[in-house]
Amino acid sequence: MNKRNYGFETKLISQDRYIDSKTGAVNPPVYYSSTFHQGQFDSFGPFDYTRSGNPTRKVLEETIAELEGGVQGFAFASGMAAISSAFMLLSSGDHVIISEDVYGGTFRMVTKVLTKFQIQHTFVDMTDLDAVAGAFRPNTKVVYVETPSNPLLHITDIRGVVKLAKAHNCLVYIDNTFMTPLHQRPLELGADIVLHSATKFLAGHSDVVAGLAVVKDEKLADQLYYIQNSFGAVLGIPDCWALLRGMKTLSVRMKQSSESAQVIAEFLQNHPLVEEVFYPGLATHAGHEIHLGQATSAGAVLSFRLPNKVIAKTFVENLEIPVFAVSLGAVESILSYPATMSHAAMGQKEREKRGITDGLLRLSVGLENCEDLVADLAQALEIAERAVGAGTVAARTVGRFI
Ligand SMILES: *Cc1c(COP(=O)(O)O)cnc(C)c1O
């Protein structure tokens, strides 16, 4: 076949990667095999043991590497396994600069686990490049960025951070979970490692926990492969298959959900009970321009602030469509309460310092009818408003923290 420079959607479906050469099956076989027979005494085949490599996992790893534009992909047992394995490239005495409103599990890993190995960290407001510039130390080795960040959708200028990091000889890791390679390709912007909780948009159906990493150059690929094989937090083979199946529809899912998210963000922004909406697709968002300069869509996740916990509770209890749960990036809309869900690992003081208050809710928009979603949010907000009017719920912001 004459290979053209195909578009992203065509790469997602690319059959020459999936077709089984032995049978013509259009999906990769699930190789349930921990070990591989070696036909010859002194010359071994490409696979020997599944922790080190497996043909089903290889299809997945090649797919994500192509989509992110890197040299090699790695599949891990979870997003945290991918992130933690990438941190294992560091040594005792090294220092990391990290987004202050990073995913709660990453916060826990950096503050509670890496510190046991004398790996130091500094949390910075990554939206402020001067603050980033001021955080470098002689032993800084990695700048770790989440953009958009979770849950406040802060935007980091990836090119700006890469420039600073390169001047200090540091690697840049980007957690690309919220955007996926459909909308943002950090390696093309100069980052060194892209990380994913593939549990979210890539798998897309709330049925798999998985992590992926992609690296830009061969040397780093060898180093991360060494960690993957040594630490052994690899993704199980049936999950590799399930993730591959989910990824084929990434583009249509993301586009539909992002379109609905924009409509919902605008609706919430105009609602009197909503104090603030955090969505990079809104022109009022502080990172709007920077985001559009490095990504092709604002994505499907938004957060918004209600005045207090009681109002948030009344609102959540009266919603009909979204599931109330942790996680994001699925076919069903998922509403989360970061204070006790994704960011429970962060103490209250740390949380409030980062603006994750008791009235904050995060919505991951799914594939339901958009008008139904807006109508559902509207009716639940109306009930919450009436409760405020009736005096059963305090109207004033309680414990609001900026
Ligand atoms: C969920 C998530 C993670 C952690 O991934 P798991 O698959 O749950 O281990 C990391 N980063 C972000 C941005 C996430 O949303």
Image: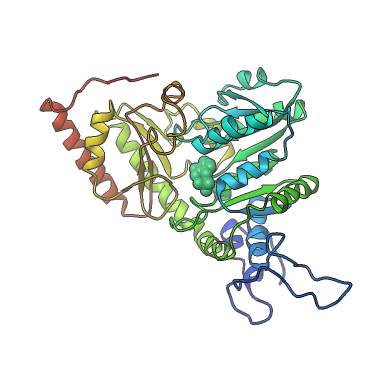
Whether residue 64 sits left or right of residue 276 in the image: it is right
Q: Residue at x 64, y 50 (%)?
A: 68
Q: Position of residue 197 (x, y in %)?
A: 54, 47
State the residue in front, 210 or 108.
Answer: 108
Whether residue 119 sits left or right of residue 78 in the image: it is right
Q: Position of residue 158 (x, y in %)?
A: 62, 33
Q: Residue at x 72, y 20 (%)?
A: 137
Q: Is residue 232 visible?
A: yes
Give the quarter of the figure containing the C terminus: top left
Give the quarter of the figure containing the N terminus: bottom right
Q: Position of residue 57 (x, y in %)?
A: 64, 62
Q: Position of residue 324 (x, y in %)?
A: 32, 45
Q: Residue at x 62, y 70 (%)?
A: 18
Whether residue 338 sits left or right of residue 121 in the image: it is left
Instruction: Answer with the quarter of the image where residue 66 lies.
Output: bottom right
Q: Residue at x 87, y 75 (%)?
A: 41
Query: By what rule are the colours in the image chosen?
Result: rainbow
Residue projecting furthest to the right: 42
Residue projecting furthest to the left: 390
Instruction: Answer with the quarter of the image where residue 172 lies.
Output: top right
Q: Is residue 185 visible?
A: no
Q: Is residue 104 above or below residue 66?
A: above
